[in-house]
Amino acid sequence: MRFLVTGAGGLIGANVALTFDSRGHDVIALDHFDVGRRENLADFRGTIHSGDIRNFHFDSLGRFDGIFHQAAITDTTVMDEKLMMSVNVDAFVRILEYADRSGCPKVVYASSAATYGKGAPPNREDQPPQPANIYAVSKVEMEKAARVFSDVHPTVKTVGLRYFNVYGPLEFHKKSAASMIYQLYRQIAAGKSPRLFKWGDQYRDFIYVKDVVEANRKAFEFPGNGVFNVGTGRGTSFNQVIAVINKVLGSTRLTDYFDNPYGFYQDATCADTERGETILGWKAGHTPEEGIIDYIGWLRSRDAAPARV
Ligand SMILES: NC(=O)c1ccc[n+]([C@@H]2O[C@H](COP(=O)([O-])OP(=O)(O)OC[C@H]3O[C@@H](n4cnc5c(N)ncnc54)[C@H](O)[C@@H]3O)[C@@H](O)[C@H]2O)c1
C-alpha cells in the first residue's frame, strides 16, 4: 500500500510512518519540521518531504491508498485563532480536496479528546463538544469539515481519532508539552523529587503511542466514516504514574506537591471505549502500567545509546 503521513516528524506521525514503513508499505513522510524533528525519522526508509501543509503542492505526490493526517498546531496555549484555524482546519480541507482529486479513498485524521473539554468523563463520542480553548475548537471544526466533505464526496471516507493523552517514544521535541509520563520519568531518573500539583490525584486516560498506531491501522481498514475515541478507558492518576516509575527505577524519593496556579485545569480525562471496540474493532493493547514499563525500557536504552537526538 502507498501511504502519506503528515506531521511525520512529530510523536504520533513518526511512530505511524516508521511502523508502516517497517511493515513493507510505501510511505511518504511530510512535515515542516518546525516542531517535529527529522531525527525522529532516522530509521525511516521512505521519502521525506519538508513542506507546510498550508501551501504544499500535494498533487506532485500522486495517488495514495490512504492518508494519515497528524500535522497540526498541537500547542494548546496558542491564542492566535487565525493561525490555528488556517493550519488545523483550512489545510485539512486542502488535504481532503486533494484526496478527492487524486482518487485516495481514505483519510484518517487526528482529532482530540480536547473536543470534550469540560464535559464530564467518561466521554462518549455522541456527547456534545465543549471545547475549552482555540485548539479544541479547531478539532471540533475539523470533524465538522470531514462530515460535510464525506457527505458531498462519498468516495473519500474519513475517520477521525479522538486521541486522549498520548505518550511514548519520540516525544523529546515536545519539551514542556511532552506527556506527564515523560516529564515525571525525567525528574525521577535525574534523582530529583517528582513535582505535582496538589495532591496528584488528577487523572488522565494515558494511551501508549504503539496503540495509537494500531488505531490508525484499524481506522484505515474500517470501510465507513466516523469519529472514535482512542484511549484505554481507564483513568490513571499522576500519583499512580509516579508509583510505577519509582518501582521500575527503584526510587524512593517523596513527591513534591505544590499549588496549582491555573484557574481552569482539567482534573480528569477518560474515554468511553465501547464504540471503538464494537464498531472499529480496536482496543488498547497495553494497560497504562504495561505501556509505562515498555516506554521506560525504551527511554533507558535510548539514554544508554550514543546520542542521536
Ligand atoms: N499527543 C497527544 O496527546 C495528542 C492528543 C490529542 C490529539 N493529538 C493530535 O495528534 C496529532 C499529532 O500530535 P503529536 O502529539 O504527534 O504532536 P507533535 O507536535 O509531536 O506533531 C505534530 C507535527 O506536525 C507538524 N506540523 C505542524 N504544523 C505543520 C504545518 N503547517 N505543515 C507541516 N507540518 C506541520 C509539526 O512539525 C510536528 O512534527 C495532532 O493533530 C494533535 O493535535 C495529539
Image (tube, rainbow, N blue to C red):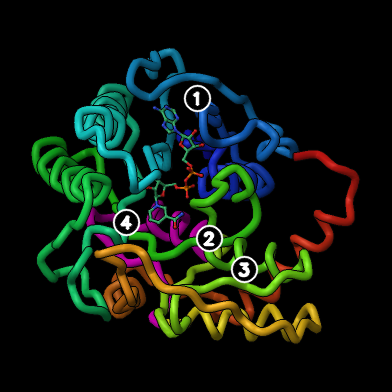
Q: Is residue 5 left or right of residue 17?
A: left
The answer to whether one can see residue 66 in this image is no
Q: Is mark 2 within 8 Å of ligand 1?
A: yes
Mark 3 or mark 2: name the one nearer the start of the chain: 2
Image depth: mark 1 or mark 3 in front: 3
Q: Label 2: few (<14), some or many (≥20) within 10 Å?
A: some
- Circle 1 sits on which residue? 32
Q: Is residue 3 one of those drawn in magenta?
A: no
Q: CA distance from mark 4 to mark 3?
A: 23 Å
- Circle 4 sits on which residue? 112
Mark 4 or mark 2: name the one nearer the start of the chain: 4
Q: Position of residue 36 (x, y in %)?
A: 55, 36
Q: Position of residue 81 (x, y in %)?
A: 20, 34
Q: CA distance from mark 1 to mark 3?
A: 29 Å
**Image point (81%, 39%), residue name:** 308
| 1 over 199 or under it: above or below | above
The quarter in which the C terminus is drawn is top right
Q: Is mark 4 within 8 Å of ligand 1?
A: yes
Magenta range is: 211-234
Say which amino acid is labelled 1: His
State which quadrant residue 9 falls in.
top right
Q: Which mark is residue 179?
A: 2
Q: Position of residue 146 (x, y in %)?
A: 19, 43
- Mark 1 residue element: loop
Q: Which mark is residue 184?
A: 3
**8 and 87: which one is in front?**
87
Q: Label 1: few (<14), some or many (≥20) within 10 Å?
A: some
